[in-house]
Image (cartoon, rainbow, N blue to C red):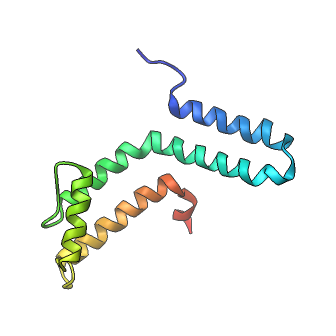
Amino acid sequence: MNIRPDATELLAIARQTLLDELLPQLPSNLRYQALMVANAMAIARRECSDGEAADAAETLLLAALPDVGGASLDEARQALCQAIRQGRFDAPGSDQEQLLAALSAITRARLSISNPKGLAE
């Protein structure tokens, strides 16, 4: 059973209502706060629609790194932090290149949720 609207659609509708109908009626001293709320709603919408895919991609990228991985994404992140602290990726070479490529991909995926305009810069 598919129930409409879903969470992402509700956030989009609420955000558009805020921007189109409420924002023009607000006094100028509240415009910034309303725009921050609208921005947070856009981020939440992208998190709802793309967050699981970003987590899955991060999990795969971390699991592919030497000495990193875990039963959960949090464990994999902790293992990565520990490996970095221990200098596992300090030496130039394929492991370091793989780490940098993974971190770059993870950052792009997270940025596409939190600030997609930042990817265009």
Relative image position of residue 13 (x, y in whole percent): 64, 32
Q: Which residue lies furthest to the top in this view?
A: 1
Find residue 120 and report its image quarter: bottom right
- Relative to 96, residue 49 above or below: above
In the image, what residue occupies the spot 18% across and 82% down?
93
- Relative to 86, residue 10 above or below: above
47 or 102, nearer to the observer: 47
Relative image position of residue 75 (x, y in whole percent): 21, 55
- Relative to 43, residue 20 above or below: above
Relative image position of residue 12 (x, y in whole percent): 61, 36
In the image, what residue occupies the spot 56% across and 31% down?
9
Q: Which residue lies furthest to the left in this view?
A: 67
Horizontal side of 77 relative to 108 (left or right) equals left
In the image, what residue occupies the spot 46% across and 45% down?
47
Find residue 1 and report its image quarter: top left
- Give the quarter of the figure containing the C terminus: bottom right
Horizontal side of 93 relative to 13 (left or right) equals left
- Relative to 113, residue 19 above or below: above
In the image, what residue occupies the spot 42% across and 61% down?
108
74 or 56, nearer to the observer: 74
Relative image position of residue 14 (x, y in whole percent): 65, 34
Q: How many marks?
A: 0
